Amino acid sequence: MALVDGNTLLRECLAELCDIEPDLRVIGQADGGPAAVALVRRDRPDVVLLDAETADGPVEVLHSLVTAPSAPRVVVLGVHGHTRAVRRLMVAGAHGYVSKRSTRAELLAVVRTVGARSDQVLLALPAIAVHRFGETPRGPLSPREVEVLDLVAQGLSNAQVGARLSICAGTVKRHLTNIYAKFGVHSRTNAINRAAALQIL
């Protein structure tokens, strides 16, 4: 497995915690997104434990990892269990999420199960967060679609969204069309309401 965390002390503590387990071995560490992608391509770990507070943005780093050749399974370690934040990570491709309020045993259990290529998405969260997940949207939104919809929800026009994301207005419109199809809606307002109901925004 590999660890991605900008906090060197925490990363080294996690490495020691995992390395004392007979069935786990940390083969690499990275302090951010570019280094993490290079590590994955070079060492091909089965599981990556990714800190949700990474300075490069957890959704962006996660997307880069799960779309890389020989993509690893990714478990995100987060400081809280806010439904909106966790759902965004699940949509982006995370295979597990562990709150930093979890115990050592809970963290290791999620890492082991995800590493065994389970077809389940595992969450170690406070119960109050878990019961709010409810239904999921039709077809998960890509990280870019989530970004587009988030900016649209702030009242930005297609041109303004495009300028913010360095893409053209036509690309923004295409993303919105895809979002409408996945949600089964026909307007920006309905898409925003649907995303809010699903705790994506």
Image (tube, rainbow, N blue to C red):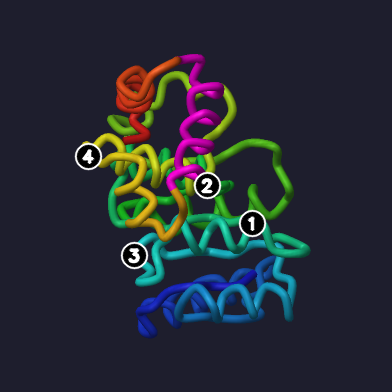
- The reply to whether the C-beta atoms of the residues labelled 2 and 3 are less than 8 Å apart is no
Q: What residue type is labelled 2?
A: Ala
Q: Which quarter shows the C terminus?
A: top left
Name the residue beneath numbered marker 1. 66
Disc 4, SS: loop
First reached walking from the N terminus: tag 2 or tag 4 = 2
- The reply to whether the C-beta atoms of the residues labelled 1 and 3 are less than 8 Å apart is no
- The reply to whether the C-beta atoms of the residues labelled 2 and 1 are less than 8 Å apart is yes
Mark 2 vs mark 3: give the one in front.
2
Disc 2, SS: helix
Most common secondary structure along the magenta stretch: helix
Q: Residue at 51% across / 40% down in the picture?
A: 91
Q: What residue type is labelled 3?
A: Glu
Name the residue beneath numbered marker 2. 92
Residue sitting nearer the eye, 23 or 148? 148
Disc 3, SS: loop
Name the residue beneath numbered marker 4. 154
Residue 81 image offset from top left, x and y in percent: 31, 44
First reached walking from the N terminus: tag 1 or tag 3 = 3
First reached walking from the N terminus: tag 4 or tag 3 = 3
Q: Residue at 52% across / 28% down in the picture?
A: 177
Disc 1, SS: helix
Name the residue beneath numbered marker 3. 53
Residue 157 image offset from top left, x and y in percent: 29, 39
- The reply to whether the C-beta atoms of the residues labelled 2 and 4 are less than 8 Å apart is no
Q: Which amino acid does label 4 sit on?
A: Gln
Identify the image quadrant of residue 23.
bottom right
Q: Which residue lies furthest to the right in this view?
A: 70
First reached walking from the N terminus: tag 2 or tag 3 = 3
Q: How far apart are marks 2 and 3 (CA)?
A: 15 Å
First reached walking from the N terminus: tag 2 or tag 1 = 1
Q: Which quarter shows the N terminus?
A: bottom right
